[in-house]
Amino acid sequence: MIQRRQVLLAALGLPAAFTATPSALAQVAYPTKPIRLIVMYPPGGPSDTMARSVAEILAGRLRQPVLVENKPGGGGQIAAAAMLQAPADGHALMLGDSAAFAANRFLYKGFAFDTQRDMAPVAPLMAMPMVLWVQHGSSVNSIRDLMALAKTRTVSFASQGPGSAGHLLGEMLKGASGADLNHVLYRGSAPAMVDLLGGQVDCLFDGIGAGLPYLRDQKLKAIATATSSRLALVPEVPTTAEAGFPAVKINIWFGLVTNAGTPAAVVTKLNEEVRLALATPQVANRFKPLGFDFMAMDQAAFDQLIRQETELLGNVVRSRGITAD
């Protein structure tokens, strides 16, 4: 049993030294009531699926209900407000992405929260490689085709919300190409994908997992990946760099935070429990085949990631002159 657990941890990138035990975790008197897991996107998208999968495992391990609440809008500000109004005791968590935690403070005037000041990083969850999707029946088969189409009419690109990775990538492509691309804003991945499938928009940067089922059903085509190298799940699809746009590249990741001021022991316990949840076959078998990369970090490493991404994405927003619609 121990050997099987060590193999699973290694496969998910968790260090062999990570051996938190029930007795060690039980030293913290937490939780004492149901936990709220607040998601910044609506139901149906990858972040919602991720939240519900992790919540199910946590509820069983912590022996308290973990209630998922979807509060989309405002680039994460609505979800953050709901969490920040709760006591700083670890019973309210927010699941957000790299845009909300690192980029959006540069897009919005008077953005309502500062991740580093107002929040305590708990744990990252997964990274999702981004892909440029078009309808399967579209005449567009490459970024070059998309640029040619933009010379004849305005091309629309959907995004999951202001400051989302889909928004930033679309604006980066627009700036790098000089093409006439019109941003169409949605509240989450699921409604954006619905309108792409229905032909209301021309293209969408979204995660490999979000589009893969439609790719297999021949409803969508992948024309580029916004990654450093080609993806194993779609090895025939070139990167944006291969298409001539090396700067159009972002890696989106998802993570959990709680209120600043939450006792360190509670945050540590949450970090350990989340990492154990990610190591379960139930979660691994669901998300690994969809191209998600699992992330294993303690709170200090996650805090450093947020700081680095804040600098990186802040530079992207400022240099491109991107603002929230």
Image (tube, helix red, strand yellow):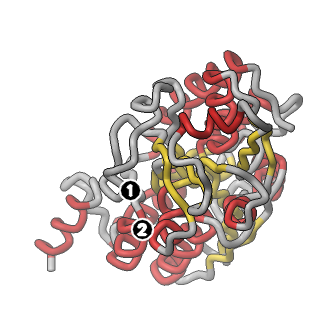
Q: Which residue is mark 2?
A: 287
The residue nearer to you, when weighing 141 against 307, is: 141
Residue 295 drawn above or below residue 209: above
Task: Tell me the SS state at disc 2.
Answer: helix
Residue at image location 28% in from the left, 55% down from the top: 14
Quadrant for the C terminus, please.
top right
Quadrant for the N terminus, please.
bottom left
Residue 4 drawn above or below residue 145: below
**Badges 1 and 2: C-beta atoms under 8 Å apart?**
yes
| Distance Cα–Cα, label 1 vs label 2 | 9 Å
* Residue 201: % across, % down: 75, 53
Q: Residues within 10 Å of mark 1 (few under 14, many from 20)?
A: many
Residue 321 drawn above or below residue 242: above
The residue nearer to you, when weighing 276 against 150, is: 150
Where residue 310 sits, quadrant-wise, is: top right
Residue at image location 51% in from the left, 42% down from the top: 142
Residue at image location 17% in from the left, 66% down from the top: 6
* Residue 97: % across, % down: 61, 48
Q: Look at the image and tell me whether residue 30 can be seen.
A: no
Q: Which residue is mark 1?
A: 294
